[in-house]
Every structure is written in C-alpha cells, then in structure tokens.
Amino acid sequence: MTDPSIYNVLYIDLTEGKHEVQERRDLFEKYLGGAGVAVKLLEEECPKGVDPLSPENPIIFTVGPLTGLFPLASKTVAMFKSPLTRNFGESHAGGRSAAAIRFAGYGAIVIRGASRNPVYISIVNDKVKIKDATTLWGMRSSYAVGRVLREVEPGAGKRTIMRIGMAGENLVRYANVVVESYRHFGRLGLGAVFGSKKLKAIVIVGTRSVKIDDVKAYTKVYEEIYKEVTETGVMSKYHVLGTSENVLPLNMLGALPTRNLMQARFELAENISGETLAEKYLAKKIACTHCPIGCIHLASLRIAFAPGHEYETLIIPYDYEPIYALGSMLGIGSAGDVLRLIEKIEGLGLDAISTGVVMAWATEAYQRGLITERETMRLRPNWGEDVEVYIRMAERIARRANEFYSALADGVEAAASKYGGLDFALTCGGNEIPGYHTGPAALVGFITGPRNSHLDSAGYSIDQKALVKPMSDEEMIKQLVEEERVRNVLTSLVICLFARGIYKLDRVSRALETLGIRRSLEELMQLGAEIQRAKASFKAREGFNPYNVRIAKRFFETPTPQGRLTEERIMRMISMYIDAADLKDIYRA
C-alpha cells in the first residue's frame, strides 16, 4: 500500500476523555476499508446483546484506500448496533466526510463510551479534543448547530461537520446525523446513538495529502474513470434530475407506495415529480468532495413569516426517497408542501423515510379509530389535506410529546404493537420500508438485506428487469445474492453506489493495483461473500432471523407491477436466498 495512513484507527473514549491511534494493518490489508473493516471493528467493539443506547454500543466510521484519490470514492461508512431494529446498523454519507477523515490521517474512527455532559469532538489532523457542547444541546434546528460550529471551528473548505438535532437528543430510534447541511447518515438511528453518548457533533479537519508511488499508472486509470463519469451518459441521470427522476416511472408502473400503500399509484405524482421540482423550485446542484457529478439537488422555497409580512427563503435538498415518504405516502400532492415537510423533518434530525412511514401508519390508524385526538393531542391527520398537521406531528415525535408520540418515536413496529394495526405497519425486520412496491425481489431484498432496505441488493431493479424479460424466482435470487456481494466490495472502498455502473470489478482491481493492492476478480467476489456472512452473523447474534420476520398483510393486498404477491412465495424465496448465499449455518428455519 502506497500511503500507510489508511491503516490508522483513531479510538476515542468519551467516558474516559481519552484517545489513541492504533495501526490496524491486519484489518485493512484483508478487508480493504469501508464496510469490510467496519463490520470487523463492530464485532470487536460491540458486546453481544448490549442495549443499543448504552455506552457499550460503539460508533464506527471508516473510509477506504481509494478515498481522496479516485472520483466518487466519497462516502463514509458508519456502523453501530441499531436502536430501531436492535441488530445491525449501517449508514453511509458523503459531503466532505470521507475526504476529511482520510486527509486527517485515518482509515477509521471508533467512538466508545458516553459523556456525562453534552460534548462535541474536534479533530484537526492529529489534534483531538472533546469540547463542551452545553450551549448547543437543545437547539431546535440542526442547521443552527452547524452555523455555530462553522464560526468557532477552523478548517473552512477542508472540514466536515456532523451533528444531531432534537430527535437525536431525545433518542428517537430513527434519528439521523446531518452532514454539512445537505447530506445525512440516515436510516437505523445513528442519531439516537449519538444522543445516548451525549455527543452533539463531530468536526473533522484534514489537511494532509496522500502519496502515490506510481503516478503514471494511477493517472491512466484515473483518467479512464473520470472520462466515463463526465463524458458518457452513465451518470447523467443523477445530474439532470437526480433520484427524483424515479417518481413518474414508478408511478406509471404502479409501484409508487401511496397513502400507506393502500394504492401504488398517486394521482398527483406529476405535481411532486423531479420534472416539476426542476422547473419550479431547483436553485442549484452541488456535489460531494471528489465527485464531478453534482447529484445533490437544492430547491429554493419562499415562505412568508406571517400574512402581510416579508419572506424567508429556504434552501432544501430533495431526493426520491423523502419525496415518496413525505409525499405520496401521506397523500401530499404539492411540491411546496413536500419541501416544507422535508426541511422541518431534517432540521429536527429525523430520518425522512421512517418519519413518513410512521405518520402514514398514524393517519390510517386514526381513520380506523385505533387512535383518537386524545393520542394525537387534538391533531386530525388526513391524507394530504393539511401539511401543518404533519409538521406538528413531526415536532411532537422529535420531543416525545406524550405516550403516543413516544411510541411513534420508537418506530412503526413499536407503535402498532401497542395500538394495533400491525397488518398495515410497513416495516421489514423492524425498519420502515423504502419506496419500491415493484415485486418479489424488492420485498425479499428488504427482508434479507443487512440494513432491511433497498440499499443492499437492489431488488427493485431486478423486478423492473423482469418486467421486460421475465425471469424465474431462482434467477431473481441469484441476482440478489450477487448484487449484494458486489456492493459489499464497492462499499468497502466507499464508492458511491450511483457509480456502480462505472466501477466494475475489473476496473476496481486495476485501480487498486495502482496503489500496490493486488486483488483478482475472484478474490474480490470472495471478499464480498465474506462480508455478507459477517453482517448476517452479527444480525443473527443479536436475534434476527429472516425465517421469523413479520410481513405486513398490506404487502399482499396491494398488487405490484408483477401482480399480487403471496406470503408463501416470499417465504419460499427467502429460503432460496439463504441457500444461495450459503447462510444456512447462520439462519436456521
């Protein structure tokens, strides 16, 4: 390996107020970095059966050997035990986070213990300080926390600022961590783990450089990748409309979850589509560090302070998933209203997908009489009619305003277990569903993927291919397993998965070789399989078993583009997945 700084792991103990750096060449030489190294550190640091909100639950950040050197190796992997699912927690974010960690001289950061009082961590290269955050604790908006830290911490342009909002402080089990102002460690509750440690924020400044021995070989591969990224159409979708481009095609297919998946088509989809947002609200596009694409779409929204008063202008990031969860799932057909809800929820530090699914369940539960205005504190949620109701619900979730909102703060599974309505509580493995009702591959992927989401094996894509060229259930499972393994390789190099069409494994192998790391295609696929087993082993260790997962009846009531699914078929495919992934010794029927 050309530059050995990637082997450095910074350990920070919040209980003791100490830190140290250890060289972990053993981990990085075997598992490369990112997800591969993180899952091994999680095995080392997280005791079996530990409470996710206890000091024993670690927070682990990792980057990879391509970070800072190749385009789109721009993500940071976070791992922890999830407070939402109570098993494996993994989340990725971009912004400046990966470059800052790498240029500060680390391949990984491990945070242990918990502080007695609110603190934030300041890392400026090899200078690590734990600072008082009493004045930041309790601020209503995570955006305000960022503005304060930008004033008091050094390193403008070369730093990342991660922080939590009110939801993280109040241990909402799907609270997120805001990175810069427009990226997030979302899903599975990393923000609640921050809150449990009284950790308000982390600021990392990196000003080093990374050495390369064979500049000629490196430049050749770099230019090959860069030209394909910028001069072909492979990545253009992400720049032109971004992921919000998915709204209309999924709606046309009948795969856009609407009103808590009572329907899969939304009659107002056009109003909240990427095309409408681009035409009426798009202000600018920005990119993560070391990415030439610029897929982060920012909307400009003017809101009057009060009738007859002046306006404030909000700059709001938007993607497909928040639009689905806070738009069609709630029956909201106004782009302006969806943007207002996104801005409020992300300011509170809530995960947008989980919050949308939680409020969709609450709306249906209210209409069915399972809950009343007594529980909602006199709010009357009704599909799409009044966005102010949903804004106030989100605020009450973030501060756990009463017993009902505290149940919502623990997730749909917890709320429905207490108040009823499990048949329409849309989780898989305890995680609220993403926005793809495309068919069997998507649902099996939600259940079997380590994160219980669409991110691990892209079943939604396999379902859409099957609409063009029909395939057997066996072929779908084969593709799910292979895709998951390839993604494990890419996320060990922290490559943005939007670039998975460019970073084919033969190109990955050549890029690594320029840094003195030699891995054949077979060795890379073997690594992907080994990481797959490591993640499954952690989940099983903490009590997860896909054979026992609850599948809401709603998934089988609303037809997909491939017709109505049956529980028998899905359970059969789950068994096929466990066989094909060679996980039979981990998950037993």
Image (cartoon, helix red, strand yellow):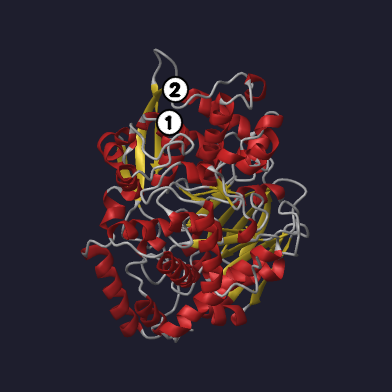
Identify the residue shown where x is 43% and y is 73%. Answer: 66
Q: Amino acid at mark 2?
A: Glu
Quadrant in the picture for the C terminus: bottom right
Residue 559, by quadrant, is top left
Q: Please, is residue 327 above or below residue 366 in the view?
A: below
The residue where tag 2 is placed is 385
Vertical order, 173 against 55 (above or below) = above
Please report the residue visible at 38 percent of the width from the left and 61 percent of the height from the top.
462
Query: From where the camera sits, is residue 154 visible?
Result: no
Label placed on residue 331 = 1
Q: Position of residue 232 (x, y in %)?
A: 22, 64
- The reply, left or right, for residue 233 in relation to residue 578 is left
Q: Residue 542: horizontal and vertical position, in percent?
A: 70, 61
Measured along the vertical axis of the image, is residue 351 above or below residue 302?
below
Percent across and percent down for residue 212 are: 41, 81
Closest to the observer, 414 or 9: 414
Whether tag 2 and tag 1 are in contact, CB under 8 A, the answer is yes
- In depth, the one of 468 and 520 nearer the eye is 468
Look at label 1 and name its amino acid.
Gly
Which label belongs to residue 151?
Answer: none
Q: Nearer the viewer, residue 90 or 437?
A: 437
Residue depicted at 31% across the width and 39% down the height? 273
Q: Is residue 407 visible?
A: yes
Which comes sooner in the sequence, label 2 or label 1?
Answer: 1
Label 2, label 1: how far apart the Cα atoms are: 8 Å
State the SS at label 1: loop
